[in-house]
Amino acid sequence: MKKRNLKAAAMTIAAAIVAAAPRLANACATCGLSDDSHALHAYKSSVLFMLASPYVSFAAIGGITYFVYRRSVRRGDSTPPTITKR
């Protein structure tokens, strides 16, 4: 029982130290930056680019697929292209 109370006290003290000193425990890259910092704007814009890249890739693949389909229909093929198994 004593060890358990000692562990709980140690954990409480450690959590209080971490909560009291946010500069020592930067949880993210922007916690220690000011609002008008160049690094903050660069970090935020890089996150936006990373979030947008899957959508751009999906749109590019869909656009290419649509373009190839429309071109095959415009050429006069009566049936759309199909995949044949060998």
Image (tube, grey):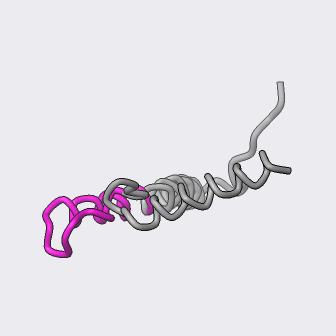
Residue 54 falls left or right of residue 38: right
Q: Nearer the viewer, residue 2 or 67?
A: 2
For image coordinates 70% across by 50% down, the residue present is 6
> In this view of the protein, can residue 46 be seen by the observer?
yes
Q: Picture coordinates of residue 33 (x, y %)? A: 22, 65
Q: Position of residue 5 (x, y in %)?
A: 75, 55
**Residue 73 colored in magenta in the image:** no
Image coordinates for residue 9, horizontal then vertical, percent: 65, 57
Residue at 50% x, 62% y: name it: 55
List the single residue furthest toward the bottom. 35
Q: Residue at x 46, y 66 (%)?
A: 19
Q: Is residue 30 magenta?
A: yes
Q: Which residue is nearer to you in this view: 75 or 12?
A: 12
Residue farthest toward the top in the current orientation of the protein: 86
Q: Position of residue 24 (x, y in %)?
A: 35, 54
- The span picked out in magenta is 29-51
Q: What kind of secondary structure does the magenta stretch mostly adopt?
A: helix
Could one spot residue 75 in this view of the protein?
Answer: no
Q: Nearer the viewer, residue 24 or 41?
A: 24
**Quadrant the C terminus occupies:** top right
Residue 49 quadrant: bottom left
- The number of callouts visible is 0
Q: Which residue is painted at 50% across and 56% down in the image? A: 54
* The one of 31 and 41 positioned closer to us in this rendering: 31
Q: Is residue 10 left or right of residue 14?
A: right
